[in-house]
Amino acid sequence: MIWKNKRQLYAFACGWITKAGYPLAVIGITKNRDLARSSVLEKLISMLDPLKFSAAALSDPRQLDYELACSLASALPRGIIAAGATVTVTGAAGPSGGIIGGASGIPASANGEPEELPEGLGLAAAPGGPGLIIHGKPEDAVLILSALPRGTGGSSVLFTAAEMAQAMQIPFLIGLTDGTGTPKPGAILIMKGRDTKTVFGELQQQLIIRLL
């Protein structure tokens, strides 16, 4: 008898420059294979493409993150377990423009504390970034996060996180950095085993990966 592993998780990510000129990258995790399709990504892009921020958000990092989180939540289809986004808004206060967490939760500021998500996922996110989701204990996500610099933007810090996760034999890691008011634009990284992929808002990208 052959036993099939019914527990499947997929990650989808996309990056593009919005109508307003914001480099934006989005990541989602789902166990619904039908949501891990290019057509779903195209619809998500079309819904987020008109993204704009209020005048208050341009001077208040928390407000910018809140508006980004609300826009993402309204665009995501049902069946998403966790999601995140990073955006670069030139001239806005920061570090900001990076959000990550459970898709069904109320938007809240990052505090570096461990958070357990469905399907065996662990979350930890620091003010100013980065934010991490792993397949494993939330405390392990905090351990990795504690070794990373804050507010850097870019992908270098995420590759460091991926190397730590690999050394800890964590099956996969999703990492995200802030993109506004940071030295480098934001980035998303997906690590599965020994492989890593990155997504940036400056580049027109779509990525779908089976995590489990």
Image (tube, helix red, strand yellow):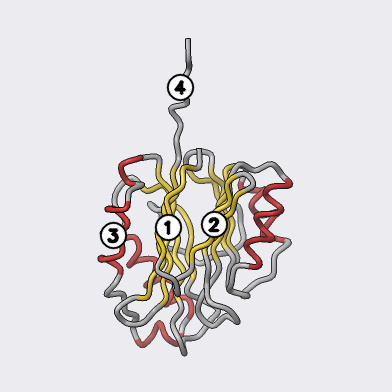
- How far is mark 4 from mark 1, CA to CA? 27 Å
Q: Is residue 139 left or right of residue 74?
A: right
Of 68 and 174, nearer the camera is 174
- How far is mark 4 from mark 3, CA to CA? 31 Å
Disc on the earlier residue, 1 or 3: 1
**Residues at discs 1 and 2 in contact (Cβ within 8 Å):** yes
Residue 202 placement (x, y as % from top left): 45, 75
Residue 196 placement (x, y as % from top left): 58, 54
Disc on the earlier residue, 4 or 1: 4
**Residues at discs 4 and 1 in contact (Cβ within 8 Å):** no
Residue at 35% from the left image edge and 40% from the top image edge: 32
> Which residue corresponds to mark 2?
197
**Residues at discs 4 and 3 in contact (Cβ within 8 Å):** no
Residue at 30% from the left image edge and 42% from the top image edge: 34
Q: Secondary structure at mark 2?
A: strand
Is 72 drawn above or below residue 207 in the view shown? below
Mark number displayed over residue 4:
4
